[in-house]
Image (spheres, rainbow, N blue to C red):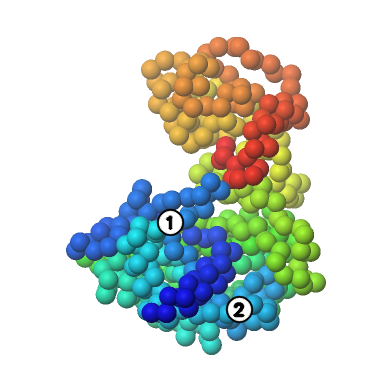
């Protein structure tokens, strides 16, 4: 093996892969079998950087050669950059060597498109197949599905990968047409449909036949690039909501566009999407998936943009003061989940704890409630803090003033979710 050449390829292809954020490894329970390598079970194959991104995977492209010319992509055909391509065996060897050295717990493999979709997808599948069948590798594998690849290859990919993802790229079809005219939205939707059908079918087969082969046990995900085209947060979240509902996606990843290319269709080079917008989208996404919020409650025609100053739950609450205060000792779980400062776990603990005694501020603090935020929206055993003459705007100002120092610190990295 020519180590210098491999190192050079690794530098080029790991750097090109960094723009894809869809690499979290949650949701797989692949176990170590036959004394093989690795284990992608929950709690083991997870490692996140401070800004919430998974770092325990070897994250590379098979190649940054590409026949397409998507305006937002560094690997676009007409971009004058150094190109490289790994062979299938080189990716397999790197994964195994990095795994043995404890650098990684899995592989995230994407690719530019060589020749055509099938030609590229076949190579991605071969990497996963070799790792599983020749090296008995049980670590996490996330493969990108190349839009337009055949169903036969997609099916094979699902037999070896934990997660598959098809990137939507732009939140809307119009955005895709503008920046990636070679691409067709339907070529992304068809594989999502196919994967959804196969995943559901596999779940049914596993109920009937314990030994049925597993198919993409960590499901499918997608990524949308935010800020390369002028779509509002409303359009971004409505699109995400549609794909969650219709394709059973495990995750939609929001990637703030990084302006690295000069093109009159794109935002200017010095106008990076603020990280806080990405974070607000993730917070809104959590509200839709775990807190029972409908997308239109978070963003709508009157409020098409998320408030960057405060999280979307607080933003919703101050627009809906008529829903508060709620009695923490009586309200349904679904209502408690809507209170700013109360997370999913705390809401469940409140419902369990109040069966034994009425809860006051001290108990709520012990449970983990952020009382400095929640106090404007709830009543409890004690009437301390009670002040009911505040408007939503007053509350926003108080909370922002209180959390100013924390807010400034957190904008450098990912914000807390609620
Ligand atoms: S097809 Fe993918 S790799 Fe190729 S230019 Fe478009 S986004 Fe980049």
Callout 2 crowding tier (Cα within 10 Å): few <14, some 14–19, many ≥20: few
Of residue 399 and residue 336, the one placed in the foreground of this image is: 399
The quadrant where residue 99 appears? bottom left
The quadrant where residue 255 appears? bottom right
Q: Where is residue 154 in the image (x, y as percent from the top left)?
A: 42, 76
Residue lying farthest bottom? 115
In the rendered structure, find residue 56 and report the number of the disc placed on it.
1
Q: Position of residue 87 (x, y in %)?
A: 43, 81
Residue displayed at 32% across by 53% down: 41
Q: Position of residue 282 (x, y in %)?
A: 58, 49
Of residue 177 and residue 63, the one placed in the foreground of this image is: 63
Question: In the picture provided, is 89 more to the left or to the right than 345?
Answer: left
Residue lying farthest left? 34
Residue displayed at 39% across by 58% down: 103
Residue displayed at 38% across by 17% down: 356
Q: Does the residue labelled 1 lie within 8 Å of ligand 1?
A: no
Q: Do the residues labelled 1 and 2 touch (CB within 8 Å)?
A: no
- The kind of secondary structure element at disc 2 is loop
- The kind of secondary structure element at disc 1 is loop
Residue tagged by mark 2? 82
């Amino acid at each position: 093996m020519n180590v210098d050449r491999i190192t050079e390829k690794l530098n080029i292809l790991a750097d090109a892969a960094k723009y894809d954020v869809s690499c979290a490894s949650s949701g797989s329970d692949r176990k170590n079998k036959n004394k093989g390598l690795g284990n992608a079970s929950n709690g083991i194959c997870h490692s996140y950087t401070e800004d919430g991104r998974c770092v325990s995977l070897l994250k590379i492209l098979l190649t940054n050669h590409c026949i397409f010319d998507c305006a937002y992509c560094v690997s676009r055909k007409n971009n004058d950059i150094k190109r490289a391509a790994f062979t299938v065996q080189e990716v397999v060897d790197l994964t195994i060597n990095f795994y043995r050295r404890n650098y990684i717990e899995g592989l995230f493999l994407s690719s530019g498109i060589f020749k055509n979709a099938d030609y590229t997808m076949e190579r991605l599948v071969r990497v996963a197949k070799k790792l599983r069948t020749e090296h008995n590798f049980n670590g996490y594998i996330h493969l990108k599905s190349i839009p337009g690849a055949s169903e036969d290859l997609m099916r094979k990919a699902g037999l070896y990968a934990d997660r598959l993802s098809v990137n939507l790229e732009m939140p809307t079809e119009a955005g895709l047409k503008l920046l990636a005219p070679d691409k067709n939205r339907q070529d992304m939707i068809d594989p999502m449909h196919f994967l959804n059908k196969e995943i559901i079918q596999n779940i049914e087969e596993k109920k009937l036949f314990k030994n049925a082969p597993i198919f993409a046990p960590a499901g499918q995900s997608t990524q949308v690039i935010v800020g390369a085209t002028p779509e509002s947060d409303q359009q971004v979240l409505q699109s995400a909501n549609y794909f969650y509902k219709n394709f059973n996606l495990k995750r939609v990843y929001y990637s703030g566009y990084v302006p690295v290319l000069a093109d009159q269709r794109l935002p200017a080079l010095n106008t990076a999407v603020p990280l806080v917008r990405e974070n607000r989208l993730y917070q809104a996404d959590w509200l839709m998936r775990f807190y029972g919020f409908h997308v239109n409650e978070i963003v709508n025609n009157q409020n098409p943009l998320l408030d960057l100053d405060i999280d979307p739950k607080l933003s919703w609450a101050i627009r809906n003061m008529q829903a508060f205060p709620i009695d923490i000792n009586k309200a349904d779980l679904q209502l408690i989940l809507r209170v700013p400062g109360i997370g999913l776990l705390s809401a469940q603990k409140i419902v369990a704890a109040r069966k034994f005694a009425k809860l006051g501020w001290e108990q709520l603090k012990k449970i983990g409630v952020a009382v400095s935020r929640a106090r404007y929206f709830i009543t409890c055993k004690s009437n301390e803090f009670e002040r009911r003459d505040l408007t939503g705007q007053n509350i926003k100002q108080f909370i922002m003033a209180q959390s100013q120092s924390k807010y400034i610190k957190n904008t450098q990295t990912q914000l807390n979710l609620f």
